[in-house]
Amino acid sequence: MFRFLKQPSPINIDTKLDLTISFLISLFVFFFLLIFQPFGLSTTEPSLRYIMISGFAAVCFLILAFNLLLIPRLLKKVFSEETWTVYKRIIWHILIVFTIGLGNYFFACLLDAIYGFYKLGFNLLISFQVITLFIAIFPITVCAIWSQNYWLKRNFKAAEEISTRLQYLELQTIDLSGFDQKVALFAENGREKYEFQIGSLLYISSEGNYVEVFSQNEGVEIRLLRNSLKKTEVQLRDYPFIFKCHRAYIVNINKITKATGNAQGFKLTLGNVDKRIPVARSYTKQFKELLGIF
């Protein structure tokens, strides 16, 4: 069970998708309330009942949109694609349901102030939380299972396609001009530099204000330079086989031996290096096109 909770889980921060999800779940809430009429809805007058149902559905939409659109953008480190797991997704969903339950309670407070309908207090707050959780279980479970399976299958298929391409077609579509050239990467101060044959480069990773350059000749050589990955990428722009696959990684495509996929995306194996290099979802399409996979 614990192993399952630690599995990578996809996270897709997309404004249009998040608004669509918020709307569909709110629509589900509207019809659920209309049919089953919890929260004392069955004892109200029809005119007031529709106002309350619409209000609870609107509260659901607004809080969902707030949570899905704003929070991940404010807490980017927490909602990192590389560290997002199943248990983090579960906790995130519980917090969303809790805030919707609070929103429903405050809406009930507003209704009580206008119509004197509810008997406010701690028991009513708990009641709203329990009923909100009960209503939310179905749409949240469906969305979570669909998302996990969709991205797992999609990324596993992409990894298989890439591995097959690497194994049988030997990167015939990649422009390897300059592969045997010697290059120099300069540090930010312009004085310190690291010279190596560009064809021996495995990958470059970003470490704070520094980049680590991994190259392979007889063994793996590591060199640390004070510079940003963006500026390093500019220094290597003349080599088509050098590709930025992630905000923190640049790889030598000719050194990739295998790709493996999971629900978050897929990762690359380069040479004899144990570390697996992630390919961010935003770079996936460009990466596949570069390999001639459409």
Image (cartoon, grey):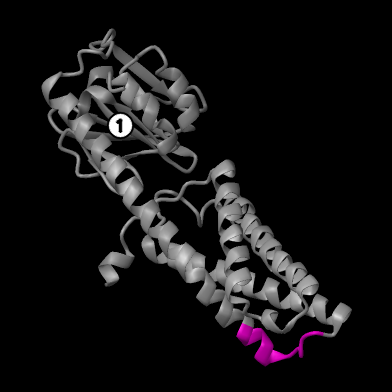
Mark 1: which amino acid? Tyr
Farthest residue to the top: give it: 177
Q: Which residue is the site of mark 1?
A: 203
Q: Is residue 28 visible to us here? A: yes
Instruction: Place residue 22 in its image quadrant.
Output: bottom right
Residue toward you, 268 or 32: 32
Is 125 covered by the magenta stretch? yes
Q: Residue at x 61, y 86 (%)?
A: 126
Is 211 covered by the magenta stretch? no
Residue 72 image position (x, y, % from top left): 57, 53
* Drawn side of residue 147 relative to residue 119, left or right: left
Residue 276 image position (x, y, % from top left): 26, 43
Residue toward you, 244 or 217: 244
Q: Residue at x 66, y 85 (%)?
A: 125
In magenta, the rendered stretch is 117-127
- State whether residue 116 is above or below residue 98: below
* Drawn side of residue 216 relative to residue 151, left or right: left
- State whether residue 49 is above or below residue 67: below
Quadrant position of the C terminus in the picture: top left
Residue 17 image position (x, y, % from top left): 54, 45
Query: Mark 1: which secondary structure?
Result: strand
Q: Residue at x 58, y 42 (%)?
A: 16
